[in-house]
Amino acid sequence: MDYDVFNGDADGILSLVQLRLHEPRDATLVTGRKRDIKLLDRVPAKEGDRVTVLDISMRSNVSDLSRILDDGASVQYFDHHNAGEQIEHPNLDAHINTASEICTAVLVDRHLDGAHRAWAIAGCYGDNFPQMAERLAQGRDLPLSNLRELGEMVNYNGYGGSEADLHFHPADLYREMAGFPTPMAFLSSKPEVIQKLTDGYYDDFAVADQAKVLMSETGAEIRILPAGAASRRVSGMFGNNLAQDNPERAHAILTQQDGGFLVSIRAPISKRAGADTLALQFETGGGRAAAAGINHLPDSDLDRFVEAFRTAF
Ligand SMILES: [Mn+2]
């Protein structure tokens, strides 16, 4: 058996499109939402099986990777996330590069000597590396605004509270694009795919634009989104946009859910600090200094959160 294991965002999907144009393979697809990064625990590979892994960190999958390698399967691995301590194994062919301007679509592009460059460029845009996308496009006559929209819409598709929230299961979205020699061929042959995603994106943002402002001060703002799949899909991107538009201000987006809120916190872009320490004051909080979240903030903790947010920023 062969397994193609990939992050369900643009970088994962468009990396696999490139690889399978080069070496077609009828593999079992293993993927999920953008946030589902522990995927190798779903792979029962055995001796003689081939496993390809794209755009999920080795650190998060290290014990299953060891199991698969020890069971005799061969693994080809491309990724740009913090890998932790890298495994060395005769069955492992790893292409890991954590340089800050690199994404997985670029690592695959290099491995294939730029053979499917336009797909790589769309992947760069989707993973939010526009400068790398433009560098890869130099000297080529490519419709960059179309590649950018494709990358960003495929990326948007990966967000949701569960797979049921997504417009396309990432494996299905991969199958829609697989085999097209270029994104341009795909876009002209199946315009309905991107149309569905752009329609969804604008509908979701119409919901987000109605967000109630709970608290707004010079340095801090809290908004509340109604319960629903639209809010769960766009809350992260909505927070990013607010942060970009108001770089000196901290933001919290609270999405209503059963008995409380899903919370997404963005530190001011000018400081990029404090989001994680705020989130960790709550039971289900976690994240990075610049961007963090709380999986469930009970209604009874709302006042405490507003106070802690005010104090933090
Ligand atoms: Mn990536």
Image (cartoon, helix red, strand yellow):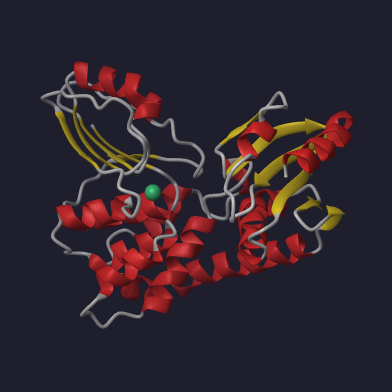
Position of residue 98 measured from the top left corner of the image (x, y, whole percent): 31, 43
Position of residue 207 measured from the top left corner of the image (x, y, whole percent): 76, 61
Question: Does the rendering let one see residue 173?
Answer: yes
Q: Residue furthest bottom?
A: 141
Question: Does the rendering let one see residue 71?
Answer: no
Residue in view at x 28 percent, y 70 percent: 135
Residue in view at x 31 percent, y 53 percent: 102
Q: Nearer the viewer, residue 182 or 305?
A: 305
Tell me the quarter of the picture where residue 81 sits: top left
Quick check: 33 left or right of 161? left
Residue in view at x 65 percent, y 66 percent: 245
Question: The C terminus is located in which quarter?
Answer: top right
Position of residue 42 measured from the top left corner of the image (x, y, whole percent): 40, 27
Position of residue 243 measured from the top left corner of the image (x, y, whole percent): 64, 58
Q: Residue furthest left?
A: 90
Quick check: 46 left or right of 34? left
Q: Nearer the viewer, residue 15 or 246?
A: 246
Rendered view: 166 above or below 5:
below
Quick check: 139 left or right of 173? left
Rendered view: 293 above or below 19:
above
